[in-house]
Structure formats: C-alpha cells, structure tokens
Amino acid sequence: MHEVLGLVFLIPIIIHLLIAWPWIQNTTKKFFQVANKRTRFNFFLNTILFILVITELLSGFLISQVALPELGIKTINDRSWRAVHNQTLNFTMLFAGLHIAVNWRWIVAAFKKRARVPNQSSEVFSIKFKSILVRVGILILAIGLISIVLYSIIGKPSLNRLYNQNEIARFYPSLGHGIVQFLGEAFLLFIVAFIARKWLRIRL
C-alpha cells in the first residue's frame, strides 16, 4: 500500500502544480524585478519542496520491492538510494509544513470561496488542452533534470550496495500499523505548520 500510494501521489502533485501554474509563471517573471520578500521566500520554498518530493518519489521507485516488481520492472534495494529516500522524508515534512504555513490564508480563502460557489471547480479545469500538454511537458522536463542530477550524484542502483534487511518483515505491516503511521506523519506535519505559522506571521 505504501508503494502504490507513492505511485498514485504523482497525480495530485501534477494537478496541484497545474492549478498553481499562473502563480508559478507570474512569480518566475517578477522574481528579479518587483517581487517582495515574501514572494521570493515562497518561490524558493516551493522550488525546494518540489525537488524534495521528486527525490522522495524517484528514490522510492528505484528501491521498490512490491509495486514495480509486480509490473515486471526489476529493481535493486540499494542502500544509498534507500538512505536518500528515508532522509528526504524528514526534510519533505519540514518544507511541506512551511509551505502550508506560508500559504495558509490562501488555502482558507480558497476553501471559503469553493464553499460559496460549489460549481466553480469547472473554471479550474477550463484551461485549453494544448496548454495543459505544454505545462505537463515542462513538469516532465523538470522532473527529468532532477532525476539526471540525482543519478549523477548517487549513481545507478548496484548489487554491491544491496540492502539485505527485510523491511516488510521488520515492520510486521498491517492496516492498523499503516493508519497509526499515517496519523503520526499527519500530526507531525500539523505541528510543523502550526509552529511555522506562528513564526512566519511575524516575519513575512
């Protein structure tokens, strides 16, 4: 379930980026001109978070022990890529919390606006199909660039760095264990966002 959810997680990420594309485009254009401190901080924060999420997903795919092998794709449980996968999660949680904290007012306003206008969701996806393809293409190029850089630094998964410990047996996975872990990660994210919100509200 962990690996399948990791694969499915790509879909909301792409949708989120497509919805936020006008902000990404405008901020990139104004970054070196009239962007204020908050906008520049948010731009750097979102860029780092994007890199972290792609790193987390890519490393997870490369060490997949269930999902990809079931699809006939051979993988190697490489120690170096597993270390990257585990360590990146901590930073991803931190920056995701900061992301929520910085954009909290926008999130609340969006939910309130959606509640007042239930049929507004059609406007979000009213972008022309050609524009969507272009934007998805740009995202794929960005993901490819990050992947190439990571591959050049860490190297191809190798049997010489094989991780022999059975993670599935070690954790004795069950639905209850998965729910507890999910709630724990969600609570951690909430704590990071809450603390960051209290601090960032003063300084940004």
Image (tube, grey):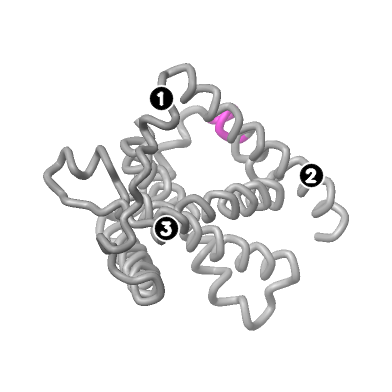
**In the rendered image, the vertical position of residue 35 relative to residue 10, given as above or below:** below
Q: Is residue 52 above or below residue 106?
A: below
Q: Which residues are magenta?
A: 113-117
- Observer-nearest residue: 13 or 118? 13
Image position, residue 102 (x, y; %)? 70, 52
Image quarter (top left, top right, bottom left or bottom right) of the N terminus: top left
CA distance for labels 2 and 3: 25 Å
- Residue 10: mark: none
Most common SS among magenta residues = helix
Foreground disc of the pair 1, 3: 1
Local secondary structure at mark 1: loop
Q: CA distance from mark 1 to mark 3?
A: 25 Å
Question: Of helix, strand and loop, which one carries label 3?
Answer: helix
1 or 3: tag closer to the N-terminus: 3
The x and y percentages for residue 93 are: 60, 47
**Horizontal placement of 6 versus 69: left or right?**
right
Residue found at the far right of this picture: 202
Residue at 36% x, 33% y is 168
Give above or below for 196 relative to 37: above
Q: Earlier in the sequence, mark 2 or mark 1?
A: 1
Q: Residue at x 65, y 62 (%)?
A: 42
Name the residue that disc number 1 marks.
Answer: 173
- What secondary structure is marked by label 2? helix
- Left or right: residue 6 versus residue 41 is left
The amino acid at mark 1 is Pro
What amino acid is at disc 2? Ile
Q: Which residue is mark 2?
A: 195
Task: Give the residue pinned by disc 3.
Answer: 54
